[in-house]
Amino acid sequence: MKILEDALTHLKRGELVIHPTEAVYGIGGFLDDAPLARLRRIKDRPGGGFVVLIPSTGFVRDLLGATGRLFAQAFWPGPLTLVLDDPEDRFHPAAKAADGSVAVRVPGHPVTLKLLETAGQPITSTSANPPGGAPARTVAAARDAGRAMGAELFALEGGPLPGGAPSTLVRPATRGAEVIRQGSVDPARLGEVVRLARSSRSADPPRRIHMTFVCTGNTCRSPMAEVIARRLIDQRRLSQVTVESAGTAALPDGPASEGARTVVQEAGLDLDGHESAVLTRELVARSDIVLCMDTHHLVRARELGGSDECRLLSEMAGEGGAVQDPFGGSDDRYRATFAELEHLVEAAVSELVPGAEGAE
């Protein structure tokens, strides 16, 4: 549409444009120094703090949290404004409130939404009227309001608008939400989502953790640690945790040792399908934590690019020292190592995933 191209041209020049919202006409521009300074001046708002219209939820997905996502899914596009923290200052400071928060929404009016999608970036939005004046429900009234504020502005035509209450203003929290301003969102529907947010057991999704256990040949200690960890993950329903094992001097695709297979089978586990793997730079890079059986494994993991994520398993469990190597030893020696690993792996998993203890 040519009118959208014209509006975009004005925005790119650093100008303000009049645009329709669900209820009344607004004024806004890109989040740059010049248009924000002009908007503050004509609205007599030296402190800034404007609603920011965004093209889609994706622009703030990582700022929403689980509660914010509930509200965005329920009400966007539409007249619900979410007040979000912006700790990394993604949004221009002049568009934000004094506490550093930013008020955002995906607008429900198709003309303005199309403008945002075409622009590929947010714009500010404040009602098209002088401070204290009546909001504009027509383009003509919005233009007159702009002139009264000393601004001749380009306008996007959206037809006569219904007026009424402004957007509803909500601040999501980790659990629940604060309704800052009741607005045009249906109160009953809003209440449903607020109650859902307050009762939801799912806050932000748990951080995914990939663990890698490391020994020398990847035939004894690290495979046993891997199957012990997998059992804990299943018992505690830790779907965010994944695990594998490798060896610093492993022969690829070799089986687990006979002793290891025997003792894990006694514990109701299985290593029959295990194939040994060499510890590589790529494996270290994709691991969130690399748990080593002895110090020479730790040295090698760090040579392959690891740093703080590479730890001795015993130290991760709050202890110290090497895990005894049962290779070539009796079944009893394997049983002793398996028992040691059960203790250390459980302690390490509990340290990595706080609150997971006893979640079976």
Image (cartoon, rainbow, N blue to C red):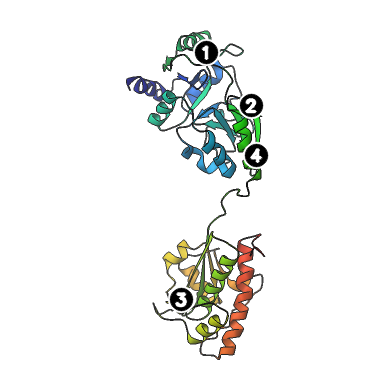
- For marks 2 and 3 on the same chain, the one whose residue lies earlier in the sequence: 2
Residue picked out by circle 3: 248
Does residue 114 show up? yes
Q: Are marks 3 and 1 in contact (CB under 8 Å)?
A: no
N-term-proximal mark, 4 vs 2: 2
Measured from the top left, where is residue 36 in percent x and y? 51, 24
Q: In this image, 321 relative to 24: left or right?
A: right
Label 4 belongs to which residue?
A: 195
Residue 291 position, x and y percent, is 55, 70
For the image, the number of numbered tags is 4
- Mark nearest the camera among 2 and 3 is 2
- The disc, 1 or 2, on the residue closer to the chain's N-terminal end is 1
Residue under pointer 2: 182
Q: Is 146 above or below relative to 203?
A: above
Q: Residues within 10 Å of mark 3 (few under 14, many from 20)?
A: many
Residue behind mark 1: 136
Amino acid identity at mark 2: Gln
- CA gap, disc 2 and disc 3: 62 Å
Q: How far is the residue under mark 1 from the one under mark 2?
A: 20 Å
Q: Are marks 3 and 4 in contact (CB under 8 Å)?
A: no
The image shows residue 126 at horizontal and vertical percentages of 54, 21
